[in-house]
Image: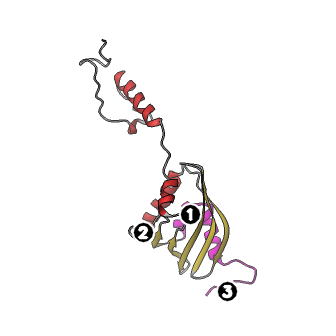
Amino acid sequence: MTRVPKGAEHPHTEILRTIYRDLTRLTDFAADDIVLHRADRTAEDPRVRRGIRAVRAHEQALLRMTEYTLVMDVEQITANDHFGTVLGVLRAERPREISVPFCGLWRFVDGRIAEHWENASCGPAELRRLFTPPPSYWPLADSQLTRTIRLNGGPDRRSPHAHLRPRHHTHTGSPGHGLPRQP
């Protein structure tokens, strides 16, 4: 058992503080066989991630999903040799503005994170809704751009959105050229 002088923090407290400052650091402190219980879990779908690679992928997906605007505002951390608890507010600006109270529960074994439970104040369905981008008109604009590019000689392979465009284009114009038939 770790003896912590009165008034000092347990070493696991600093580990948790580091993780909540930079989620990409979680795997620096995790056991290889870490188990993560996602916040959007249900009894029917536990959404468990097992192993350091799966946990890293989950954390990176959260950051990408929020376009790297995710911030975990920590209000309180308590930790000992076996467990840690972090209370705070999860905030993000994308895909929509989010502000959700959270409680992270952690289990430590031999100084490494063995298990983590993500918990949010809202239910799984609401959490998924918050992390889903709102409807956008950009796909329609991109579709029109794709048609224009294809009719004028093909896609620009240098475009960062080329991978989003359909591979095949059909049009109702006359055969043999890319312009619509004139009445």
- Looking at the rendered structure, the kind of residue marked 2 is Val
The answer to whether residue 58 is left or right of residue 12 is left
User: Which of pointers 1 and 2 lies earlier in the amino acid sequence?
Assistant: 1
Residue visible at 56% across and 49% down?
A: 96
User: Which of pointers 1 and 3 lies earlier in the amino acid sequence?
Assistant: 3
Callout in the foreground (2, 3): 2
Element under disc 1: helix
The answer to whether residue 182 is left or right of residue 114 is left
Please give the residue where the numbered disc 3 appears in the rendered image. 3
- Looking at the rendered structure, the kind of residue marked 3 is Arg
Element under disc 3: loop
Position in image of residue 131 (x %, y %): 51, 54
Q: CA distance from mark 1 to mark 2?
A: 20 Å
Position in image of residue 7 (x %, y %): 76, 80
Please give the residue where the numbered disc 1 appears in the rendered image. 25
- Looking at the rendered structure, the kind of residue marked 1 is Arg
Residue visible at 49% across and 54% down?
A: 129
Q: Which residues are magenta?
A: 1-29
Element under disc 2: strand
Q: Are marks 2 and 3 in contact (CB under 8 Å)?
A: no
Q: CA distance from mark 1 to mark 3?
A: 25 Å
Label 1: how many Cα within 10 Å (few below 14, some 14–19, many 20+): some
Label 3: how many Cα within 10 Å (few below 14, some 14–19, many 20+): few
User: Does the rendering let one see residue 7?
Assistant: yes
Residue visible at 24% across and 18% down?
A: 176
The label on residue 48 is 2
